[in-house]
Image (tube, grey):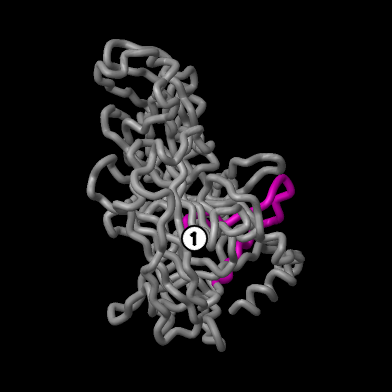
Amino acid sequence: MKKYILFCLLLSGLSPISLMAQMTNTDRVYDDNIVSVLLYANGNQLKDPVVELNSTNKLTLSFDDLSNRQENYKYTLIHCTSDWKTSDLNPIDYLSGYTEGDITNYKFSFNTLTPYIHYQLNFPQSQVRPILSGNYILKVYLDDDGDTNVLITRRFFVVEPLVSVAAKVPYYPKNLAYFKKKQQIDLTCHTPDIFLAEPQQRFKITIRQNDRWDNAYVDLHPTSVTPNELQYNFVDGIVFNSGNEPRYFDMKDFWYRSEYIRSITQLKSYYKVLLHTDYSREGGQYETYKDNHGKMFIAARSNQNPMIEGDYAEVYFYLKIPKINTGDVYILGQLTDWQLNRNSRMTYNKQTQQYEGHLLLKQGYYEYWYAVLPAGSKQADITPIEGSFWETQNTYTIYVYYHNRNLEYDRLVGIQKINAH
């Protein structure tokens, strides 16, 4: 498999050295041998990585190492500001115990074409425990925490629930030009008396649509303040493109072809899965179905342990549309870490007149969209390919921060998740 990855790199013109990128405070993998990274709460893969301050709740990190060589991986926690810059706090200010821990729970894959080692970490632990609320980065590395040794960074949240949020998506937006096109978030924060000092300056909110970061609203301050209440009444409102429900495919079993899978071929060290050709949904009719808002779920047959018996496939995506000259097309969802990078970018095949891409994925259930990233932009847009329907069942997560003047850090004092409808 390592030879296969190297072969793909050579075909794409990338060298292994180019993969040693600078660490960033994002959800990112820095080594192509590290795959199927998940971070979730309460033992549920679909739960957001949120833990309450001073609670006994745990988060779970899991990942596979395709090098199939056991390593002594370490981890640390990094406190961040509300906009994900590394805070000025010293680790002793926000961590109890040690500043790093070891990942000692691992198992070798069993009866798989692709050999790998599955690692798992449950935290916070007594020896490495956050004692302040806020945004955090879980950093996994080998030997020491220098940037060249970093394997994984993952965002998570430690909340002290002191502020309540009332939020909804109204039928009529403030700007009627957005009617039936965009979803507006109306919200009010109810605050206790302990937050009376400088509320307009010290309160900030972040709003995410589904699990995306590229189109998130960050550092929004209240527009007006009344006793124990913060209002966010912007002229055009807080609006998001409605988009569409995600596409999906079920790859829990390689012994049969489920809906949207064209073919499954067993090769020497992995499977090859071709998906049916996708087409644009822009201008079509809205169809609703129960979905997981772009998440993935590692799973296998009922008689398998998916964490160590789940196998891998190179999955090929095909999108039959005319070439878009204003930007690049990406596969967007948890299956690509919600990243717009070389791994998720598709290439246009002039002969077949379609976009093509491929991802190495473990057995499971996957959801995704096709997104266009305009040249020079950092925010992708799914509407040119997926369409935009006000009825779309998006989820919105609202994070409320309050800047603490004593230690100069952003406390996370409330989280509220709502469905669009």
Quadrant for the C terminus, please. top left
Quadrant for the N terminus, please. bottom right
* Left or right of residue 51, residue 287 in this image: right
Can I make out residue 238 in this image?
Answer: yes
Question: Residue at 45% of width from left, 75% of height from top?
Answer: 117
Q: Position of residue 280 (x, y in %)?
A: 57, 55
Q: Position of residue 157 (x, y in %)?
A: 38, 42
216 versus 63 height, above or below: above
* Left or right of residue 37, residue 21 in this image: right
Question: Residue at 54% of width from left, 54% of height from top?
Answer: 145
Which residue, given by chain and number where applicable, does mark 1 sit on?
A: 335
Res 2 quadrant in image: bottom right
Residue with the most extreme left position: 56
How crowded pointer 1 is (Cα within 10 Å; few <14, some 14-19, many 20+) is rated as: many
Q: Nearer the viewer, residue 345 or 78?
A: 78
- Whether residue 208 appears in magenta in the rendering, the answer is no
Can I make out residue 211 in this image?
Answer: no
Q: Which residues are magenta?
A: 315-337
Res 193 quadrant in image: top left
Question: Residue at 40% of width from left, 52% of height from top?
Answer: 287
Q: Position of residue 14 (x, y in %)?
A: 73, 64
Res 110 quadrant in image: bottom left
Q: Position of residue 65 (x, y in %)?
A: 50, 71
Q: Secondary structure at mark 1?
A: helix
Q: Nearer the viewer, residue 172 or 247?
A: 247
